């Protein structure tokens, strides 16, 4: 329909963009057409979005003209960049600046929804200065505030908690790894009693869709998404009980954690960044539950239930992690 608005979703086959595309197509299609941006529109996940009704378009975030083409005509944008794509802060910040610049020039743009993170440098009295993925998001925010105040005025940031899926996708760093005796170990530089906010990445689609639906009421807000806060030790126990896999939580020192990562061949700056990232998880509960943020209970629609950890464990295919 010609009178529909257009939302452009960047990273449309990713952990947040994919769920956002699916949720909006299912729940807001009377109002919005969806343009799904991905690097490779021929891959199965992109073709699946096309079958659902999305306009799938290829774009390179490092190419100014490509980004301008991808965003053209947008009334709303979901913007996301990923440090881990290139494992480079400079690349992520440069790409985000290109996206911000292009978005700022769109005359019909009404809402800019930005996937972001808290500034890790402010946690624990400034203890963590090297969490590169967090620092990158802080620089992107600073770029918006300083250089694009009009765009910033219609921006909503969304902070999505630690994905349940990280256990599979980044198992050597963030999930269980197999010890010499065959036991799977979750090794972290904090106590097993530490509660860490977590979420199923699929639920991010609902959060992004409801921010879009809420429009101006979310301008200038930081919206958080998390489903529950088991302790890390309890998460390991639930996983072991549900899967029948022998597993344990192990608290280690930051130095021991860094040493394990270095043994995998990670470069020193990534070892430092990743160790600080997991150390900082013990402060995430206070950060995410702060009343300065819009909490999940304030925007979840009636009848929608966030996925719990046990529900996620039961539906996930654990064979890539356990080698079955």
Image (cartoon, grey):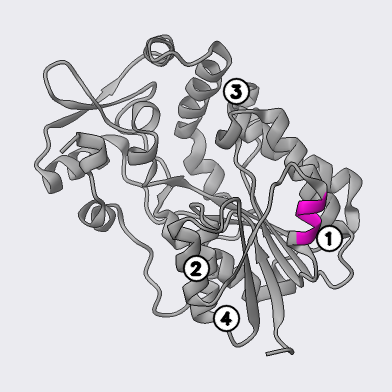
Q: Residues within 10 Å of mark 2 (few under 14, many from 20)?
A: many
What residue sits right under mark 2 in the picture?
Answer: 49
In the rendered structure, the answer to whether residue 183 lies left or right of residue 295 reads left
Disc assigned to residue 264: none
In contact (CB < 8 Å): disc 1 and disc 3: no
How many angstroms separate mark 2 from mark 4 (CA)?
Answer: 15 Å
Sequence-earlier tag: 2 or 4 = 4
Q: In front here: 117 or 282?
A: 117
What residue sits right under mark 3 in the picture?
Answer: 128
In contact (CB < 8 Å): disc 3 and disc 2: no
Sequence-earlier tag: 4 or 1 = 4
Q: In front here: 208 or 101?
A: 101
Sequence-earlier tag: 1 or 3 = 3
> Vertically, is 320 above or below 79?
above
> Vertically, is 217 above or below 116?
below
Q: Which of marks 2 and 4 is in front?
A: 2
Q: In front here: 130 or 33?
A: 33
Q: Where is residue 52 in the image (x, y as percent from the top left)?
A: 48, 75
How many angstroms separate mark 4 from mark 1 (CA)?
Answer: 24 Å
Secondary structure type for disc 1: loop
Sequence-earlier tag: 3 or 2 = 2
What residue sits right under mark 1 in the picture?
Answer: 153
Q: Which of marks 3 and 2 is in front?
A: 2
In the rendered structure, the answer to whether residue 100 lies left or right of residue 211 reads right
Q: Where is residue 59 in the image (x, y as percent from the top left)?
A: 68, 53
Secondary structure type for disc 4: loop
How many angstroms separate mark 3 from mark 2 (CA)?
Answer: 39 Å
How many angstroms separate mark 1 from mark 2 (CA)?
Answer: 31 Å
How many angstroms separate mark 1 from mark 3 (CA)?
Answer: 29 Å
What residue sits right under mark 4 in the picture?
Answer: 28
In magenta, the rendered stretch is: 65-69
Residue 2, visible in the rendered structure: yes
């Amino acid at each position: 329909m010609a009178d529909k608005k257009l939302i452009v979703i960047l990273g449309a086959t990713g952990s947040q963009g994919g769920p956002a595309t699916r949720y909006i197509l299912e729940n807001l299609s009377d109002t919005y057409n969806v343009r799904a941006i991905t690097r490779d529109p021929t891959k199965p996940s992109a073709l699946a979005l096309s079958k659902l009704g999305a306009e799938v378009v290829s774009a390179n975030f490092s190419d100014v003209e490509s980004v301008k083409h991808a965003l053209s005509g947008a009334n709303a944008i979901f913007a996301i960049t990923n440090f881990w794509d290139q494992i480079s802060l400079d690349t992520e910040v440069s790409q985000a600046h290109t996206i911000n610049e292009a978005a700022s020039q769109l005359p019909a743009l009404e809402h800019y929804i930005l996937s972001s993170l808290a500034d890790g440098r402010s946690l624990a009295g400034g203890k963590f200065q090297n969490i590169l993925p967090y620092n990158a998001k802080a620089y992107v925010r600073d770029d918006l505030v300083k250089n694009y105040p009009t765009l910033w005025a219609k921006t909503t940031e969304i902070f999505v908690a630690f994905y349940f899926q990280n256990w599979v996708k980044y198992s050597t760093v963030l999930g269980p790894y197999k010890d010499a005796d065959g036991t799977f170990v979750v090794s972290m530089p904090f106590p097993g009693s530490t509660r860490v906010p977590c979420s199923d990445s699929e639920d991010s689609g609902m959060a992004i869709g409801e921010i879009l639906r809420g429009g101006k009421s979310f301008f200038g807000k930081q919206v958080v998404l998390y489903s529950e806060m088991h302790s890390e030790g309890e998460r390991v126990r639930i996983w072991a009980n549900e899967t029948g896999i022998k597993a344990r939580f192990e608290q280690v020192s930051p130095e021991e954690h860094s040493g394990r990562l270095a043994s995998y061949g990670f470069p020193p700056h990534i070892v430092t960044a990743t160790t600080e990232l997991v150390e900082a998880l013990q402060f995430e509960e206070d950060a995410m539950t702060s009343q300065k943020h819009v909490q999940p209970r304030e925007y979840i629609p009636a009848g929608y239930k966030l996925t719990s950890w046990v529900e996620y464990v039961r539906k996930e295919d654990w064979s890539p992690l356990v080698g079955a």
